[in-house]
Amino acid sequence: MNKVYQFLNLHFGEEAKDKVLENVTSSISFRGANVWILACAIAVASVGLNVNSTAVIIGAMLISPLMGPIVGAGFALAIYDFDLLKKSIKNLAIATVVSLFVSFLYFLLSPFKEAQSELLARTAPNIYDVLIAFFGGLAGVIALTRVEKGNPIPGVAIATALMPPLCTAGYGLAIGNFSYFGGALYLYTINCFFICISTFLIVKLLKYPKVKFVDSAREKRITRTITTLILVILIPSFYLAYQLLQEKKYSQNVDAFLQEEFINKGYTLIYEKTSFNSRPKKIELAFLDKKFANTEIEDLNKKLTDYGITNTDLVIRQDSTDLKRDILAEISKQSRNVSEKDVTIQNLRTELSTYTFNDAELIKEINILFPELAPYSIGKQLVVVNPDSSFHQNIITYSAQKPLNDNTTLKLQKWLENKLGTKSVRIVRAN
């Protein structure tokens, strides 16, 4: 039992308590360089969210000095240093306002205001975000109290993700979407509060000395206040997690319904829109050539309950004019959201096409008209004349035992020039 205790003992490798407290206190203040670093980090994170770049967002989280006052508040609560607590809350408020202002200004000026997936991910927090903040905070504070800080500190900055919710809140303000603003600010509050609580618990566990004597009645009031705040923050997160689970189940049921009732029967689905948050919920569909009678639509609506889909209206769009407009709008929206990866792939394909030869019909004709050429290879090659001049040339390299005579070679060359519409053709016999 003693070995297990030694194995799990948090006091092993612990930094001196006064030195840890000194480091925590020094990282709380937001003045001068810290404000500028925070503003730059927020700007970087905003750009990352705007262009949907995870790597840029992670970089911004590593730059951010936001953790300082949050950890400071947790320490202050645990050791009953109310002056330090006031200072931590004041500096966290300053940091929050600066961050919101910078992100609001960026998104207000940015011409790209489309809500990307990285932005949307921060608008509906749930219980899983609570767990991430709490356990991430635990890891961070444990690392902070060690002699050797190690790798957890940057990892905690990434995992607890304080920057992206603030930027998303700024985005919500800039576009006037207070649902995004409220959801993102709630996620930010969750992260701050549960990092603070995890700090409080570790500091208590490590038995840091109290700065001020607090009577038992006041200590109980502080504990009750913390417990109440935990419940106030937890309850909405549980509700949002429940909503997320319900939406996932609903989506799976809709997919099963579509598969069984339409796709398996050979109907070509060309339009699908599911409105989970409308009352009642709505499934809108359209098909390539299948027309449904009103009685068929009524029967399909009745079948929804067989798949666990309740309080839902099934609407089959059969008005070609309105449907065409909606489909074109959806295509236009998707084309605006083409990712950087897709653009890169298309550019590579275009570049690759300049070096590949893929004309099966031409190869078939060569085999008929010039059977003596086989075996041969045909392709495009970059010919460099000098460092500033180059061109692509179509080359046929053949390995026949008997070389083509001059007349056949000339005939093949003229024929290829005519077929390919270029004078850049060369015929080479491999040695």
Image: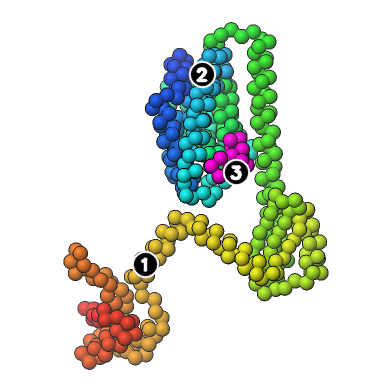
Q: Please tell me which of labels 3 and 1 falls first in the chain.
A: 3
Residue beneath the point at 33% across and 82% down: 420
Q: Nearer the viewer, residue 350 or 133?
A: 350
Q: Amino acid at mark 1?
A: Leu
Point out which mark residue 428 bears: none
Residue beneath the point at 34% across and 91% down: 369
Q: Say which residue label 2 marks.
A: 87
Q: Secondary structure at mark 3?
A: loop
Q: Nearer the viewer, residue 215 or 50?
A: 50
Q: Nearer the viewer, mark 2 or mark 1?
A: 2
Q: Nearer the viewer, mark 3 or mark 2?
A: 3
Q: Say which residue label 1 marks.
A: 352
Q: Is residue 181 above or below residue 262?
A: above
Q: Amino acid at mark 3?
A: Asn
Numbered range of the magenta stretch:
173-186
Residue beneath the point at 72% across and 56% down: 282
Residue beneath the point at 35% across and 72% down: 356
Cα–Cα span, label 3 and label 2:
32 Å
Cα–Cα span, label 2 and label 1:
60 Å
Decide whether residue 414 is among the magenta residues: no
